[in-house]
Image (cartoon, helix red, strand yellow):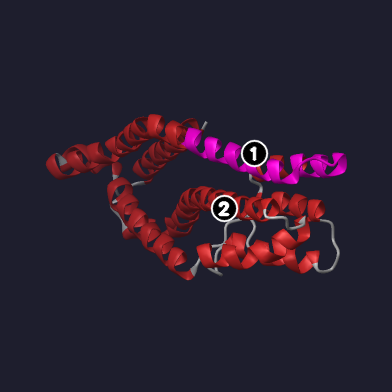
Protein backbone atom coordinates (compact mmCIF):
# COMPACT_ATOMS: atom_id res chain seq x y z
CA UNK A 1 0.00 0.00 0.00
CA UNK A 2 1.11 3.52 -0.71
CA UNK A 3 1.69 5.82 2.19
CA UNK A 4 1.27 9.55 2.16
CA UNK A 5 4.55 10.62 3.76
CA UNK A 6 6.39 9.52 0.63
CA UNK A 7 5.02 9.89 -2.87
CA UNK A 8 5.60 6.98 -5.23
CA UNK A 9 5.78 8.11 -8.85
CA UNK A 10 4.24 6.03 -11.60
CA UNK A 11 6.26 5.34 -14.75
CA UNK A 12 4.25 7.97 -16.62
CA UNK A 13 4.86 10.56 -13.89
CA UNK A 14 8.59 9.80 -13.87
CA UNK A 15 8.66 10.34 -17.63
CA UNK A 16 6.83 13.66 -17.28
CA UNK A 17 9.29 14.78 -14.60
CA UNK A 18 12.27 13.82 -16.76
CA UNK A 19 10.92 15.65 -19.82
CA UNK A 20 10.21 18.78 -17.77
CA UNK A 21 13.67 18.55 -16.18
CA UNK A 22 15.34 18.26 -19.60
CA UNK A 23 13.42 21.29 -20.84
CA UNK A 24 14.27 23.27 -17.70
CA UNK A 25 17.95 22.33 -17.98
CA UNK A 26 18.02 23.43 -21.63
CA UNK A 27 16.42 26.78 -20.78
CA UNK A 28 18.90 27.39 -17.94
CA UNK A 29 21.82 26.33 -20.10
CA UNK A 30 20.92 28.85 -22.81
CA UNK A 31 19.66 31.75 -20.71
CA UNK A 32 22.30 31.73 -18.01
CA UNK A 33 25.39 30.14 -19.60
CA UNK A 34 24.99 29.90 -23.39
CA UNK A 35 26.71 26.53 -23.13
CA UNK A 36 25.62 22.94 -23.62
CA UNK A 37 27.94 22.00 -20.76
CA UNK A 38 25.41 23.54 -18.39
CA UNK A 39 23.22 20.49 -19.07
CA UNK A 40 25.21 18.87 -16.24
CA UNK A 41 22.58 20.59 -14.09
CA UNK A 42 20.05 18.02 -15.32
CA UNK A 43 20.20 15.85 -12.13
CA UNK A 44 19.59 18.93 -9.96
CA UNK A 45 16.74 20.05 -12.22
CA UNK A 46 15.26 16.55 -12.13
CA UNK A 47 15.36 16.55 -8.31
CA UNK A 48 13.79 20.01 -8.23
CA UNK A 49 11.02 19.09 -10.69
CA UNK A 50 10.23 15.83 -8.87
CA UNK A 51 10.05 17.73 -5.60
CA UNK A 52 7.66 20.35 -6.95
CA UNK A 53 5.42 18.02 -8.95
CA UNK A 54 5.56 15.38 -6.22
CA UNK A 55 4.26 17.89 -3.67
CA UNK A 56 1.47 18.89 -6.05
CA UNK A 57 0.46 15.32 -6.85
CA UNK A 58 0.70 14.27 -3.20
CA UNK A 59 -1.67 17.03 -2.10
CA UNK A 60 -4.05 16.14 -4.90
CA UNK A 61 -3.89 12.49 -3.86
CA UNK A 62 -4.57 13.37 -0.23
CA UNK A 63 -7.70 15.25 -1.27
CA UNK A 64 -8.86 12.25 -3.31
CA UNK A 65 -8.18 9.93 -0.38
CA UNK A 66 -10.16 12.18 1.95
CA UNK A 67 -13.13 12.21 -0.44
CA UNK A 68 -12.98 8.42 -0.66
CA UNK A 69 -12.73 8.13 3.12
CA UNK A 70 -15.84 10.30 3.36
CA UNK A 71 -17.58 7.85 1.03
CA UNK A 72 -16.45 4.97 3.22
CA UNK A 73 -17.97 6.63 6.30
CA UNK A 74 -21.26 7.21 4.47
CA UNK A 75 -21.47 3.55 3.49
CA UNK A 76 -20.65 2.31 6.99
CA UNK A 77 -23.08 4.81 8.53
CA UNK A 78 -25.92 3.53 6.35
CA UNK A 79 -25.19 -0.09 7.25
CA UNK A 80 -25.04 0.73 10.96
CA UNK A 81 -28.47 2.39 10.72
CA UNK A 82 -29.73 -0.74 8.98
CA UNK A 83 -28.82 -2.77 12.07
CA UNK A 84 -25.41 -4.19 11.20
CA UNK A 85 -22.75 -4.50 13.88
CA UNK A 86 -19.59 -2.43 13.45
CA UNK A 87 -17.45 -5.30 12.18
CA UNK A 88 -20.16 -6.61 9.84
CA UNK A 89 -20.78 -3.10 8.51
CA UNK A 90 -17.14 -2.89 7.42
CA UNK A 91 -17.22 -6.36 5.89
CA UNK A 92 -20.47 -5.73 4.01
CA UNK A 93 -19.53 -2.20 3.00
CA UNK A 94 -16.37 -3.23 1.16
CA UNK A 95 -18.15 -4.37 -2.00
CA UNK A 96 -20.29 -1.22 -2.13
CA UNK A 97 -17.14 0.88 -1.80
CA UNK A 98 -15.31 -1.06 -4.52
CA UNK A 99 -18.25 -0.61 -6.90
CA UNK A 100 -18.14 3.16 -6.35
CA UNK A 101 -14.38 3.78 -6.43
CA UNK A 102 -12.87 0.74 -8.12
CA UNK A 103 -10.22 -1.64 -6.86
CA UNK A 104 -7.07 0.32 -7.68
CA UNK A 105 -7.42 3.43 -5.53
CA UNK A 106 -5.49 3.64 -2.27
CA UNK A 107 -8.55 3.69 0.00
CA UNK A 108 -9.85 0.51 -1.65
CA UNK A 109 -6.59 -1.17 -0.72
CA UNK A 110 -6.89 0.21 2.80
CA UNK A 111 -10.52 -0.98 3.08
CA UNK A 112 -9.51 -4.50 2.07
CA UNK A 113 -6.60 -4.45 4.52
CA UNK A 114 -8.86 -3.32 7.36
CA UNK A 115 -11.35 -6.11 6.67
CA UNK A 116 -8.57 -8.69 6.37
CA UNK A 117 -7.30 -7.75 9.82
CA UNK A 118 -10.82 -7.56 11.22
CA UNK A 119 -11.19 -11.24 10.37
CA UNK A 120 -8.11 -11.80 12.52
CA UNK A 121 -9.99 -10.19 15.47
CA UNK A 122 -7.87 -7.03 15.56
CA UNK A 123 -9.89 -4.17 17.16
CA UNK A 124 -11.34 -1.76 14.62
CA UNK A 125 -10.21 1.30 16.59
CA UNK A 126 -6.60 0.09 16.34
CA UNK A 127 -6.96 -0.37 12.57
CA UNK A 128 -8.36 3.13 12.14
CA UNK A 129 -5.47 4.58 14.13
CA UNK A 130 -3.02 2.79 11.84
CA UNK A 131 -4.89 4.12 8.80
CA UNK A 132 -4.56 7.67 10.17
CA UNK A 133 -0.82 7.17 10.70
CA UNK A 134 -0.29 5.82 7.17
CA UNK A 135 -2.27 8.51 5.37
CA UNK A 136 -1.21 11.42 7.59
CA UNK A 137 -4.55 13.09 6.88
CA UNK A 138 -5.69 15.27 9.77
CA UNK A 139 -9.40 14.50 9.34
CA UNK A 140 -8.82 10.75 9.46
CA UNK A 141 -6.65 11.15 12.56
CA UNK A 142 -9.37 13.17 14.29
CA UNK A 143 -12.01 10.61 13.34
CA UNK A 144 -9.94 7.72 14.71
CA UNK A 145 -9.63 9.52 18.05
CA UNK A 146 -13.36 10.31 18.24
CA UNK A 147 -14.22 6.75 17.24
CA UNK A 148 -11.95 5.20 19.87
CA UNK A 149 -13.37 7.46 22.60
CA UNK A 150 -16.98 6.82 21.55
CA UNK A 151 -16.46 3.06 21.49
CA UNK A 152 -14.93 3.07 24.97
CA UNK A 153 -17.82 5.16 26.28
CA UNK A 154 -20.51 3.17 24.46
CA UNK A 155 -21.70 6.03 22.26
CA UNK A 156 -24.01 5.95 19.24
CA UNK A 157 -21.56 4.78 16.56
CA UNK A 158 -23.95 5.47 13.71
CA UNK A 159 -24.21 9.11 14.81
CA UNK A 160 -20.42 9.30 15.19
CA UNK A 161 -19.95 8.15 11.58
CA UNK A 162 -22.62 10.48 10.22
CA UNK A 163 -21.40 13.53 12.15
CA UNK A 164 -17.82 12.84 11.04
CA UNK A 165 -18.97 12.60 7.43
CA UNK A 166 -20.66 15.99 7.72
CA UNK A 167 -17.60 17.60 9.31
CA UNK A 168 -15.30 16.24 6.62
CA UNK A 169 -17.66 17.56 3.91
CA UNK A 170 -17.65 20.99 5.58
CA UNK A 171 -13.85 20.92 5.82
CA UNK A 172 -13.50 20.03 2.14
CA UNK A 173 -15.79 22.91 1.18
CA UNK A 174 -13.79 25.35 3.31
CA UNK A 175 -10.55 24.22 1.64
CA UNK A 176 -12.12 24.73 -1.77
CA UNK A 177 -13.11 28.27 -0.83
CA UNK A 178 -9.60 28.99 0.46
CA UNK A 179 -8.04 27.63 -2.74
CA UNK A 180 -10.36 29.84 -4.77
CA UNK A 181 -9.32 32.92 -2.79
CA UNK A 182 -5.58 32.29 -3.16
CA UNK A 183 -5.77 31.12 -6.80
CA UNK A 184 -5.18 34.68 -8.05
CA UNK A 185 -2.16 35.09 -5.76
CA UNK A 186 -0.76 31.77 -6.93
CA UNK A 187 -1.14 32.83 -10.57
CA UNK A 188 0.49 36.18 -9.79
CA UNK A 189 3.42 34.44 -8.12
CA UNK A 190 3.89 32.11 -11.07
CA UNK A 191 3.87 35.04 -13.51
CA UNK A 192 6.37 36.99 -11.40
CA UNK A 193 8.61 33.92 -11.32
CA UNK A 194 8.83 34.02 -15.12
CA UNK A 195 9.71 37.71 -15.31
CA UNK A 196 13.50 37.33 -14.73
CA UNK A 197 13.73 34.67 -17.44
CA UNK A 198 11.67 36.88 -19.72
CA UNK A 199 14.05 39.78 -19.16
CA UNK A 200 17.08 37.61 -19.94
CA UNK A 201 15.37 36.25 -23.05
CA UNK A 202 14.47 39.76 -24.25
CA UNK A 203 17.94 41.13 -23.70
CA UNK A 204 19.59 38.05 -25.18
CA UNK A 205 17.51 38.33 -28.34
CA UNK A 206 17.39 42.12 -28.65
CA UNK A 207 20.72 43.27 -27.17
CA UNK A 208 23.10 40.27 -27.17
CA UNK A 209 26.20 42.52 -26.93
CA UNK A 210 24.99 43.79 -23.53
CA UNK A 211 25.11 40.31 -21.97
CA UNK A 212 28.03 38.88 -23.93
CA UNK A 213 30.63 39.72 -21.19
CA UNK A 214 28.74 37.34 -18.86
CA UNK A 215 29.22 34.30 -21.10
CA UNK A 216 32.29 32.23 -21.88
CA UNK A 217 34.42 33.25 -18.88
CA UNK A 218 34.75 32.21 -15.23
CA UNK A 219 33.67 35.59 -13.88
CA UNK A 220 30.49 35.50 -15.94
CA UNK A 221 29.77 31.93 -14.91
CA UNK A 222 30.16 32.91 -11.25
CA UNK A 223 27.88 35.94 -11.63
CA UNK A 224 25.19 34.04 -13.53
CA UNK A 225 25.39 31.13 -11.09
CA UNK A 226 24.82 33.56 -8.22
CA UNK A 227 21.85 35.07 -10.05
CA UNK A 228 20.45 31.61 -10.72
CA UNK A 229 20.81 30.70 -7.05
CA UNK A 230 18.99 33.86 -5.95
CA UNK A 231 16.28 33.24 -8.52
CA UNK A 232 15.76 29.65 -7.33
CA UNK A 233 15.70 30.79 -3.70
CA UNK A 234 13.13 33.49 -4.44
CA UNK A 235 10.95 30.99 -6.30
CA UNK A 236 11.03 28.48 -3.43
CA UNK A 237 10.28 31.24 -0.92
CA UNK A 238 7.30 32.34 -2.99
CA UNK A 239 6.02 28.77 -3.17
CA UNK A 240 6.36 28.40 0.59
CA UNK A 241 4.45 31.63 1.25
CA UNK A 242 1.62 30.51 -1.05
CA UNK A 243 1.31 27.20 0.83
CA UNK A 244 1.09 28.87 4.25
Q: Nearer the viewer, residue 230 or 60?
A: 60
Is the N terminus in the top left, top right, bottom left or bottom right quadrant? bottom right
Q: Can you see residue 1?
A: no
Residue that protrudes farthest toward the left in the picture: 206
Q: CA distance from mark 2 to mark 1?
A: 13 Å
Residue that mark 2 sits on: 71
Q: Can you see residue 111?
A: yes
Reading the chain from its start, which is encountered first: label 2 or label 1?
2
**Residue 39 drawn at (x, y percent):** 38, 59
How many numbered dots are placed on residues in this image? Answer: 2
Q: Nearer the viewer, residue 124 or 208?
A: 124
Q: Nearer the viewer, residue 145 or 240?
A: 145
Residue 118 is tagged as: none
> Taking 226 as reference, is 104 left or right?
right
Q: Is residue 227 magenta?
A: no
**Residue 4 drawn at (x, y percent):** 62, 53
Residue that mark 1 sits on: 163
Q: Kindly identify the residue that appears in the image at 47 percent across and 48 percent down.
A: 56
**Residue 71 drawn at (x, y percent):** 57, 53
Q: Kindly identify the residue that appears in the image at 72 percent across and 50 percent down.
A: 133
Q: Nearer the viewer, residue 101 or 132?
A: 101
Q: Which residues are magenta?
A: 146-175
Q: Kindly identify the residue that appears in the image at 34 percent across and 50 percent down.
A: 28
Graded by Cα atoms within 10 Å as few (under 14), some (14 to 19) or many (20 or more), the crowding at tag 1 reads: some
> Which type of secondary structure does the marked residue at label 1 adopt?
helix
> Taking 234 as reference, is 63 left or right?
right
Q: Is residue 134 above or below residue 161?
A: below
**Residue 206 drawn at (x, y percent):** 12, 41
> Which type of secondary structure does the marked residue at label 2 adopt?
helix
Graded by Cα atoms within 10 Å as few (under 14), some (14 to 19) or many (20 or more), the crowding at tag 2 reads: some
Q: Is residue 171 magenta?
A: yes
> Taking 90 as reference, is 98 left or right?
left
Amino acid sequence: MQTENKYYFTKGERLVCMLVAVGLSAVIAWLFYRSVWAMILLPICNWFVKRQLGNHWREKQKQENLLQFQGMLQIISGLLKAGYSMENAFLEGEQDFLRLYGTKCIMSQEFRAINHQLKMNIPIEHLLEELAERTEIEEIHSFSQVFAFAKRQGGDMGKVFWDSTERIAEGIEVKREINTVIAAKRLEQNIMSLVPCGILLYMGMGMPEFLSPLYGNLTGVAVMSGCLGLYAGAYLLGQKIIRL
